[in-house]
């Protein structure tokens, strides 16, 4: 299958999943409004995401090349690798959940220092509930990665649509008087399980699952996975900084900041998922390793990303105001809240081209096995954002997205330098 067709197939399904996620978020806002319950749910659901992203970064980076090589040898070897690692991921998730749940009140108090004790307590309960989704999410991620490695891109994307539709049904189906942050957290875990059922069904149908061999569960340590783990830890400081900052700005600030990211995140998620799955597989194949040493080939990938993202950036920048009023200004709260969402969204939109550069260079560096470069460029990203956020800008809403925009463009430049150092010719 041609590379362009792979992007189109996965891109369509990913965009559908992201749009369903946006509809889910709009439904939640319309049912709850910009109320403290919305803050609690958004914070609770994002904190497990930090834990999940740290673990999944290592999974995808280390597993994808192994799966591609196994698939080139035989489908049986790939099936054994998938079965073993999916079960290992599920067990790892259980261990992490058991370790983190007792710490949830402490973690919430540190991440959301601007909230009162009652709000922190309710958030820690919802956080503990949402943590239960991590074992299933890790299991799902291995199955999705395995399906990507054999070119079955649609299956993984459909699982995200299934989860989003399930969540929309739960939001509409739960009586309004019972629609609490805790109820939404339980619905989130149950819909994640629904996505797991779909992926298991598809993986079994493709012959990708068998009984795991427990004797092979000893984890393998290598420099690549260690560097990716450190890089992922660094990157997860980004959303944590967002929440710490938002908790100090007043009522609904965390939710306003997060909803300002939703529309740009549809574009970012589309780019990230398709590039990670398609280019990750493409760059992992040994027969195309030399391709990364050819400037014309590298710039073709980067140029294609720019050709898509720059027009989208311009359109979204011009339409930020009507989009936000259309999505959030119906029974959702004050005009001031919508105006703040618009200010956050506009600055994030202008960061999209830098995000595209970061995504393409990330995959190129992984294709070269330059995981150490992934680490130091991640540190540059976090340092740039932290220095802007806590030293150069006053504590207002617009200072957070402005710091991200500066950090992303700084990181994009550092990624290009890292590619050149890794032997990926830029000229």
Image (cartoon, rainbow, N blue to C red):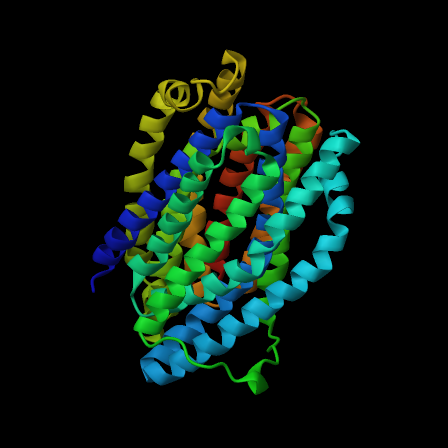
State which quadrant residue 375 falls in: bottom right
Q: Is residue 158 visible?
A: yes
Residue 268 in the image: above or below residue 189: above
- List x then y, in percent, for residue 213: 52, 85
- List x then y, in percent, for residue 195: 42, 56
Q: Nearer the viewer, residue 351 or 212?
A: 212
- List x then y, in percent, for residue 157: 35, 54
Instruction: Please identify the residue farthest to the bottom as the structure is shown.
Output: 215
**For this view, does 125 lie left or right of residue 53?**
right
Q: Nearer the viewer, residue 372 or 183?
A: 183
Residue drawn at the location 71% of the way across and 26% of the way down:
248
**For this view, does 337 lie left or right of residue 71?**
right
Residue 48 in the image: above or below residue 221: above
Residue 192 in the image: above or below residue 183: below
The quadrant the N terminus occupies is: bottom left
Residue drawn at the location 32% of the way across and 44% of the way down:
15
Residue 33 in the image: above or below residue 390: above
Residue drawn at the location 76% of the way across and 32% of the way down:
118
Q: Nearer the viewer, residue 197 or 18?
A: 197
**For this view, does 8 lie left or right of residue 316?**
left
- List x then y, in percent, for residue 108: 72, 42
Could you tell me how many numbered marks the image carries?
Answer: 0
Q: Nearer the viewer, residue 100 or 353?
A: 100
């Amino acid at each position: 299958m041609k590379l362009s067709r792979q992007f189109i197939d996965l891109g369509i399904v990913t965009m559908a999943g992201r749009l369903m996620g946006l509809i889910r978020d709009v439904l939640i806002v319309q049912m709850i409004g910009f109320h403290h319950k919305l803050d609690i749910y958004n914070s609770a659901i994002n904190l497990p995401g930090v834990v999940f992203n740290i673990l999944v970064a290592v999974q995808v980076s280390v597993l994808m090349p192994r799966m591609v090589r196994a698939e080139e040898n035989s489908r049986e070897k790939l099936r054994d690798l998938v079965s073993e690692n999916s079960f290992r991921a599920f067990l790892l998730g259980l261990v992490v959940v058991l370790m983190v749940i007792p710490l949830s009140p402490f973690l919430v108090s540190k991440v959301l220092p601007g909230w009162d004790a009652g709000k922190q307590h309710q958030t820690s309960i919802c956080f503990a509930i949402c943590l239960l989704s991590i074992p299933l999410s890790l299991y799902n991620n291995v199955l999705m990665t395995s399906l990507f490695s054999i070119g079955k891109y649609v299956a993984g994307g459909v699982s995200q649509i299934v989860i989003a539709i399930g969540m929309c049904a739960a939001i509409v189906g739960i009586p309004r008087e019972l629609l609490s942050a805790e109820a939404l957290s339980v619905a989130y875990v149950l819909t994640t399980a629904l996505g797991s059922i779909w992926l298991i069904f598809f993986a079994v149908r493709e012959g990708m699952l068998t009984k795991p061999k427990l004797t092979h569960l000893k984890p393998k340590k290598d420099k690549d996975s260690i560097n990716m783990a450190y890089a992922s830890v660094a990157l997860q400081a980004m959303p944590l900084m967002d929440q710490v900052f938002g908790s100090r700005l007043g009522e609904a600030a965390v939710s306003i900041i997060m909803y300002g990211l939703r529309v740009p995140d549809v574009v970012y998620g589309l780019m990230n998922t398709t590039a990670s799955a398609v280019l990750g597989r493409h760059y992992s194949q040994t027969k195309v390793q030399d391709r990364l040493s050819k400037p014309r080939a590298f710039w073709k990938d980067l140029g294609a990303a720019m050709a898509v993202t720059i027009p989208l950036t311009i359109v979204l920048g011009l339409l930020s105001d009507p989009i936000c009023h259309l999505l959030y200004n119906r029974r959702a709260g004050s005009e001031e809240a919508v105006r703040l969402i618009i200010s956050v969204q506009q600055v994030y939109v202008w960061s999209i081209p830098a995000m595209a550069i970061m995504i393409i260079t990330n995959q190129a560096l992984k294709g070269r096995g330059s995981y150490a470069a992934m680490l130091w460029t991640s540190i540059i990203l976090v340092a740039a954002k932290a220095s802007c956020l806590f030293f150069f800008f006053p504590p207002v809403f617009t200072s957070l997205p402005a710091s991200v925009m500066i950090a992303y463009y700084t990181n994009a430049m550092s990624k290009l330098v890292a590619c050149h150092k890794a032997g990926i010719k830029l000229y």
